[in-house]
């Protein structure tokens, strides 16, 4: 009888012992964050779906409008990229003089 009891205790691991007394191990950061990130992702998908159902425009109209706005901003973005590239090439010429 004692051998059987001893054998059953040897086979227990930490998880099983904690489960027997109604406790659980502490969860690490990944185990706490992953469900939150998953719920956030589901919320995004549901929000996009609802937004598409109640949108006042069709998908084609919305894409065309976004394309037009993007094309309007493209020259300004190109200028900003050019200015940044010039600053990287000549960092002393753009620095303020003391």
Image (cartoon, helix red, strand yellow):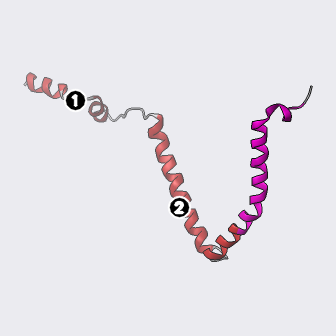
Q: Secondary structure at mark 2?
A: helix
Disc ID at residue 12: 1
Relative to the observer, which residue lies in front, 36 or 1?
36
Instruction: Where is residue 45? Give x, y as percent.
Output: 53, 61
In the rendered image, the vertical position of residue 88 relative to residue 36, given as above or below? above
Relative to the observer, which residue lies in front, 8 or 98?
98
In the rendered image, the vertical position of residue 69 relative to residue 36, given as above or below? below
Structural crowding at the residue carrying mark 1, measured as other residues with C-alpha within 10 Å and reported as few (<14), some (14–19) or many (≥20): few
Q: Secondary structure at mark 1?
A: loop
**73 sits to left or right of 43:** right
Picture quadrant where residue 9 is located: top left
Relative to the observer, which residue lies in front, 98 or 85?
85
Relative to the observer, which residue lies in front, 12 or 31?
31
- At x 9%, y 27%, the residue is 4
Quadrant of the image for the N terminus? top left
- At x 50%, y 42%, the residue is 33
**67 sits to left or right of 43:** right
- At x 52%, y 54%, the residue is 41
Disc ID at residue 45: 2
Picture quadrant where residue 18 is located: top left
Magenta region, residue range: 68-96
In the picture as drawn, the residue positioned furthest to the left comes out as: 1
Report the predominant secondary structure element of the magenta stretch. helix
Instruction: Where is residue 11? Give x, y as percent.
Output: 18, 29
Decide which of tag 2 and tag 1 comes sooner along the chain. Answer: 1
């Amino acid at each position: 009888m004692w051998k059987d009891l001893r054998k059953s205790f040897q086979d227990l691991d930490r998880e099983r012992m904690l489960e027997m007394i109604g406790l659980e191990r502490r969860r690490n950061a990944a185990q706490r964050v992953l469900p939150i990130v998953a719920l956030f992702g589901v919320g995004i998908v549901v929000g996009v779906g609802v937004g598409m159902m109640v949108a006042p425009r069709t998908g084609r109209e919305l894409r065309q409008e976004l394309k037009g706005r993007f094309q309007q901003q493209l020259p300004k973005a190109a200028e900003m990229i050019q200015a940044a590239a010039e600053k990287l090439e000549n960092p002393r010429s753009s620095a303020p003089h003391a």
